[in-house]
Amino acid sequence: MKIESWLFGTGVFFFVPVAVVYGFLTNWHEWVGIMGMLLVGGLAGMIGSYLGVTARRVGTRPEDRDDAEIHEGAGEQGHFSPWSWWPLILGAAAAVGVLGIAVGWWIFFIGAGIGIVALVGWVFEYSRGDHAH
């Protein structure tokens, strides 16, 4: 993960100076672009720092070594729920929420309610029913 953390970490050193240059070019009158680029730089820094901390915790992966073989990365890559419908419902709730911002706020609150239910259902998916632990 050292490559990933380096790639995201350098995003800070790109987006923040570009935001300052953009501010000078617009005479600091166009705040949406300036704040957007500053926020993207901050997000890149947060993701890069998270990946750096995770890289120290996990250790060296086969992807990080130049002499690694393909078979070293074989095996289980994580735990996934192929039968789960909650991500689909959560995505639909996000779409309804964005539609509510564009059309009317009452629709946004319906999407937020569905989103809360879907998020709770997804988090507690393994706490009840056939797949309870």
Image: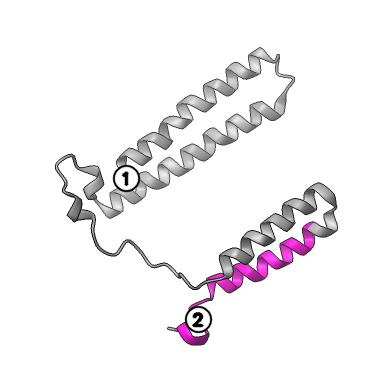
Q: Which residue lies at the image location 78% right of the left edge and 49% below the top edge?
A: 101
- Residue 107: image location, x then y, percent: 81, 59
Camera-side residue of 78 and 27: 78
Residue 128 covered by magenta stretch: yes
Q: Which residue lies at the image location 63% right of the left edge and 69% below the top edge?
A: 118
Instruction: Give the quarter of the image for residue 7.
Output: top left
Question: Type of residue at label 1?
Answer: Met
Tell me how the rendering is colored: one colour
Classified by dominant secondary structure, the portion drawn in magenta counts as helix
Residue 63, relative to residue 122: is it above or below? Answer: above
Image side of residue 61 versus residue 26, left or right: left
Q: What residue did someone put label 1 on? A: 1
Q: What residue did someone put label 2 on? A: 127
Residue 61, relative to residue 77: is it above or below? Answer: above
Q: Which residue lies at the image location 85% right of the left edge and 52% below the top edge?
A: 104
Picture quarter with the N terminus: top left
Circle 2 SS class: loop
Question: Type of residue at label 2?
Answer: Ser
Q: For mark 2, does the 10 Å Cα neighbourhood hold few (<14), some (14 to 19), or many (20 or more) residues? A: few
Image side of residue 4 versus residue 132, left or right: left
- Residue 30: image location, x then y, percent: 72, 23
Circle 1 SS class: loop
Image side of residue 14 versus residue 30, left or right: left
Per the rendered image, the range of residues in magenta is 108-132
Image side of residue 116 versus residue 13, left or right: right
Residue 100 covered by magenta stretch: no
